[in-house]
Amino acid sequence: MEYIFENADIVRDYECDLQGIVNNANYQHYLEHSRHMFILDRGVSFAQLHADGIDVVVARFEISYKTPLRPGDRYLCRLRPEKQGVRYVFHQAIFRASDNQLCIRAKVDCAVTVDGRLVSGHPKLDALLA
């Protein structure tokens, strides 16, 4: 899959469970942070969207766990967004930086509300995907 955005980070000790691997829920945090960094990289703040009455909310989340990350691992979170009908879909993956090993693959479907009402998209968001 061809990704159009990437950000790097490192696993912190407190994100891991008793088995010494990243707790499954923390991968969702990594993916969300990457989506926020993606729009920020394009000059749009998630907080400003909300202030303007535009909210992007997760409607569906699919994740496949492949290889666990461990404390101190550096990782790369990559994404490719697309519009599918009324949804914005983010295809995302996390790779261990040291060997480019796939750790997780995810598909995140998002819906948009404007002033609390569900809409089929927004020009400001469409421009992010262009």
Image: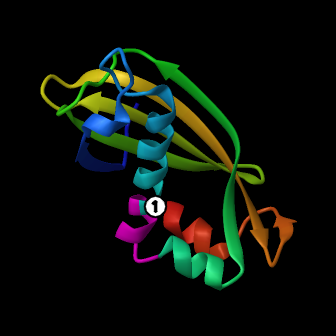
Q: Quadrant of the N terminus?
A: top left
Residue that lies at the very extreme toward the left in this rendered image: 98
Q: Is residue 11 visible?
A: no
Task: Work out whether residue 58 or residue 42 is closer to the camera in this orientation and state it.
Answer: 58
- Residue 74 at x, y = what percent? 19, 36
Residue hosting label 1: 36
Say which residue appears at 73% left-offset and 62% top-offset. 112
Say which residue appears at 64% left-offset and 76% top-offset. 50
Tell me: 18 left or right of 9.
right
Q: Residue 73's image quarter? A: top left
Tell me: 33 left or right of 109.
left
Q: Is residue 64 above or below residue 30?
A: above
- Residue 22 at x, y = what percent? 36, 27
User: Is the magenta region chiefly helix, strand or loop?
Assistant: helix
Magenta residue span: 37-44
Residue 41 sits inside the magenta stretch: yes
Residue 43 sits inside the magenta stretch: yes
Q: Residue 103's image quarter? A: top left
Q: Is residue 101 visible?
A: yes
Query: SS for tag 1?
Result: helix
Q: Is residue 64 above or below residue 49?
A: above
Density class for disc 1 (Cα within 10 Å; few <14, some 14-19, many ≥20) is some
- Residue 55 at x, y = what percent? 69, 68
Hey, what amino acid is under mark 1? His
- Residue 61 at x, y = what percent? 64, 35
Tell me: 105 left or right of 115.
left
Q: Residue 111's image quarter? A: bottom right
Say which residue appears at 77% left-offset and 54% top-offset. 86
Colour scheme shown? rainbow
